[in-house]
Image: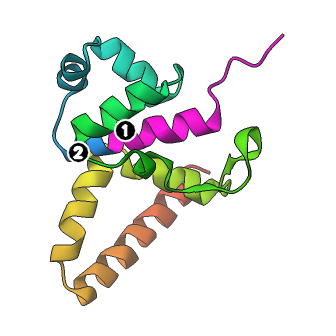
Amino acid sequence: MADKSPDPIDRHVGSRIRMRRIMLGMSQETLGEALGLTFQQVQKYEKGTNRIGASRLWQIAETLGIPVESFYEGLQGGSGAAASLSDSAEHAFMSEFIATSDGIALARAWPQLGSKLRRSLVDLVEQIAEREKGSRR
């Protein structure tokens, strides 16, 4: 039986679409309307469960105001099927996190903080994470 999970490249492109859409404060419904699609179809594109054709990807890029190649940032090497995501677990986690509304809000606010405050926040979050990790054992 064939594997039904989305291709990693389709998931990556979908997450980049989601990230850009959220950065613009655009709903799936609004993007869908601009493309002549339902919000459910936009969801499927963003999850990578439905592949996006070249002309549709061009249309999405135009609607989101970014070049098509930006959807492929973070992909590495190879030709055709040999191309793959840079497959570290950390890279996958970061891509998923930054595609969330919390991740985007944090990324927008972060540069406005001074370097000492940023370092203090990182230390604080690491300490909290360690405590959480310890309390789950």
| Residue 85 in the image, given as x and y percentages of width and height | 64, 50
Residue 92, placed above or below residue 30: below
| Residue 60 in the image, given as x and y percentages of width and height | 32, 32
Tell me if mark 1 has few (under 14), some (14-19) or many (20+) residues whose alpha carbon lies within 10 angstroms of its own.
many
Residue type beneath disc 1 = Ile
- The coloring applied to the image is rainbow
Q: Nearer the viewer, mark 2 or mark 1?
A: 2
Residue range of the region highlighted in magenta in the rendering: 1-19
Q: Is residue 64 left or right of residue 10?
A: left
| Residue 112 in the image, given as x and y percentages of width and height | 15, 75
**Residue farthest to the bottom?**
116
Please tell me in which quadrant of the rendered image residue 121 appears: bottom left
Mark sitting earlier along the chain (2/1): 1
Please tell me in which quadrant of the rendered image residue 30 appears: top left
On residue 65, the disc is: 2
* Residue for badge 1: 17
SS category of the residue bearing label 1: helix
Q: Is residue 30 left or right of residue 118?
A: left
